[in-house]
Image: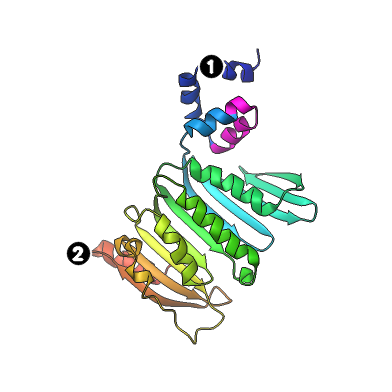
């Protein structure tokens, strides 16, 4: 009897226990084995052990990276005239898969939504990057709509300690922050790409948000075309008294990059 047949014959309770010890990659492999596995996994939604997530939006590629059990995995979804190229890197190995007649954008969101669906614990770090060169891309608006819809579907809200956003304007950041648990946040950092620094950002609406007020430390930075060009627009430390830890946090906000 094969191992697959053995698993499929397990009662629900033992199978659920097995899934608690399966990492994300193995879980997705199991989903593709048969309808029985996929339906069961999607029904019980076993929690993942991912601690860090980074997603990046570009005009011809979307990328997400995550840390699970101390292992870093990077998956790139790239545009190809015949479909989508998926490149996965982990443990020093590289895997490439060509998906014909598949859109890289749809493939990325399909997998990313599954990751968030299984994310029940508090993330240590969540980093979202919308690249400067996507400013005039129609897909950027669609990317944000998908992102908002995915976060809105999460119950409870996405829980993260350290949240970092790289966006084209503050409206993009403000459109997703309401879907993040404001009680769990410790550090909130927002980078805004600017073509020039002549006009300063209006941060008045941002500083009214609960997630801004609740974070231990928060900052808004303006980035020039070169990442070395940085202006600190807004920053705060939320603490009742000043001590060594507070001073160190203030230093980290000022010299974040």
Q: Which mark is residue 10?
A: 1
Q: Identify the element where label 2 is drawn.
A: loop
| Residue with the mark numbered 2 | 240
Q: Is residue 23 left or right of residue 212?
A: right
Q: Is residue 28 a member of the stretch shown in magenta? A: yes
Q: Is residue 197 above or below residue 26?
A: below
Q: Which mark is residue 250?
A: none
Q: Which residues make up the magenta segment?
A: 24-37
Residue at 46% across, 65% down:
173
Image point 73% across, 48% down: which residue? 102
Looking at the picture, tell me which residue is in the foreground, 169 or 227.
169
Label 2 environment density (alpha carbons within 10 Å; few <14, some 14–19, many ≥20): few
Residue 257 position within the rendered picture, expressed as x and y whole percent measured from the top left: 47, 68
The quadrant the N terminus occupies is top right
Q: Earlier in the sequence, mark 2 or mark 1?
A: 1
| Residue 208 position within the rendered picture, expressed as x and y whole percent measured from the top left | 33, 69
Between circles 2 and 1, the one closer to the viewer is 1
Q: Residue at x 54, y 60 (%)?
A: 144
Q: Is 166 situated above or below 157?
A: below
Residue 139 forms part of the magenta stretch:
no
**Foreground residue, 172 or 2?**
172
Q: Position of residue 213 (x, y in %)?
A: 30, 64
Residue 195 seen in this snapshot: yes
| Label 1 residue SS | loop
Q: CA distance from mark 2 to mark 1?
A: 55 Å
């Amino acid at each position: 009897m094969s191992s697959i047949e053995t698993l499929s014959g397990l009662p629900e309770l033992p199978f659920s226990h097995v899934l608690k010890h399966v990492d994300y990659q193995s879980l997705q492999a199991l989903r593709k084995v048969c309808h029985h596995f996929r339906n069961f996994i999607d029904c019980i939604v076993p929690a993942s052990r991912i601690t860090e997530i980074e997603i990046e939006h570009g005009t011809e590629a979307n990328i997400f990276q995550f840390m699970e059990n101390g292992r870093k995995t990077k998956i790139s979804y790239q545009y190809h005239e015949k479909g989508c190229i998926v490149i996965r890197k982990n443990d020093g190995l590289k895997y490439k898969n060509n998906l014909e007649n598949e859109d890289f954008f749809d493939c990325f969101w399909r997998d990313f939504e599954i990751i968030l669906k299984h994310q029940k614990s508090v993330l240590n770090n969540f980093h979202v990057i919308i690249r400067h060169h996507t400013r005039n891309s129609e897909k950027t608006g669609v990317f944000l709509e998908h992102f908002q819809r995915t976060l809105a579907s999460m119950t409870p809200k996405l829980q993260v300690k350290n949240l970092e956003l790289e966006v084209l304007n503050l409206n993009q950041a403000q459109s997703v922050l309401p879907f993040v648990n404001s009680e769990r946040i410790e550090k909130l950092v927002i980078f805004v790409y600017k073509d020039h620094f002549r006009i300063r950002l209006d941060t008045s609406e941002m500083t009214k948000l609960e997630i801004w007020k609740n974070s231990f430390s928060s900052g808004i930075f303006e980035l020039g075309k070169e990442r070395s060009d940085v202006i600190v627009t807004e920053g705060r430390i939320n603490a009742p008294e000043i001590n060594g830890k507070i001073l160190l946090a203030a230093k980290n906000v000022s010299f974040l990059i």
